[in-house]
Image (cartoon, rainbow, N blue to C red):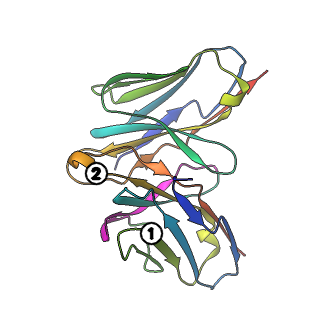
Amino acid sequence: KNEVEQSPQNLTAQEGEFITINCSYSVGISALHWLQQHPGGGIVSLFMLSSGKKKHGRLIATINIQEKHSSLHITASHPRDSAVYICAVRESGGGADGLTFGKGTHLIIQP
Amino acid sequence: DTGVSQNPRHKITKRGQNVTFRCDPISEHNRLYWYRQTLGQGPEFLTYFQNEAQLEKSRLLSDRFSAERPKGSFSTLEIQRTEQGDSAMYLCASSSSQGGHYNEQFFGPGTRLTVL
């Protein structure tokens, strides 16, 4: 059974700080998603990656397939970055498309 | 707005009643997913369609749950004889299989179900 673990569960930081959220998983995957969820429930896809590194604005996502680990970094954090960040993976090995999710990291950026 | 839409956004029902939710995916997306999220937890996969075919179902999808996508466009998720444990946010997502590849999933706003 695939397990997706995120750390930390909760993170409070000051505006401007560099933020790192970690995700580890236990089985082979074909893709990993980083998602952002604001209060009220809406989920926005930030990144989908299967190797290496992706960057979008102040957000950077990296993945190490051998170590089964991914990180999401936020540079120059801002209060509007406050949200729950969720890691989700699609297992490899044929056809299964349903994602397995971590429990999320609740991030609060204080002004 | 051309994103994924879900209706209703909120539903309050009494235990034992049946409820039905609707999801309209992004128009060119042939894949549609249903997930359930309880408070403080990450979402959990329920089921997945490619066009009108239901290709994958989680063991979470008990026989009280049924999902359809009759014309390969919108989908409905019905819960019969609701129980208090069914209270959750029900999320729909869609993606395309363009090029035969797995592509990014786009999520709807969700339907929040409360069973009294």
* Residue A87 x, y percent position in the rendering: 47, 38
Task: Using the rendered view, name the quadrant where residue A29 is placed.
Answer: top left
Up/down of A79 relative to A6, above or below: above
* Residue B35 x, y percent position in the rendering: 48, 59
* Residue B66 x, y percent position in the rendering: 44, 77
Quadrant containing the C terminus of chain A is top right
* Residue A35 x, y percent position in the rendering: 51, 39
Report the span colored magenta: B40-58
Q: Which residue is mark 1?
A: B74
CA gap between label 2 and label 1 equals 17 Å
Of B114 and B103, which appears nearest the observer?
B103
- x 70%, y 30%: residue: A80
Q: Residues within 10 Å of mark 2 (few under 14, many from 20)?
A: some
Chain for mark 1?
Answer: B
Circles 2 and 1 in contact, beta carbons < 8 Å: no
Q: Main secondary structure of the magenta part?
A: strand
Q: Which residue is mark 2?
A: B97
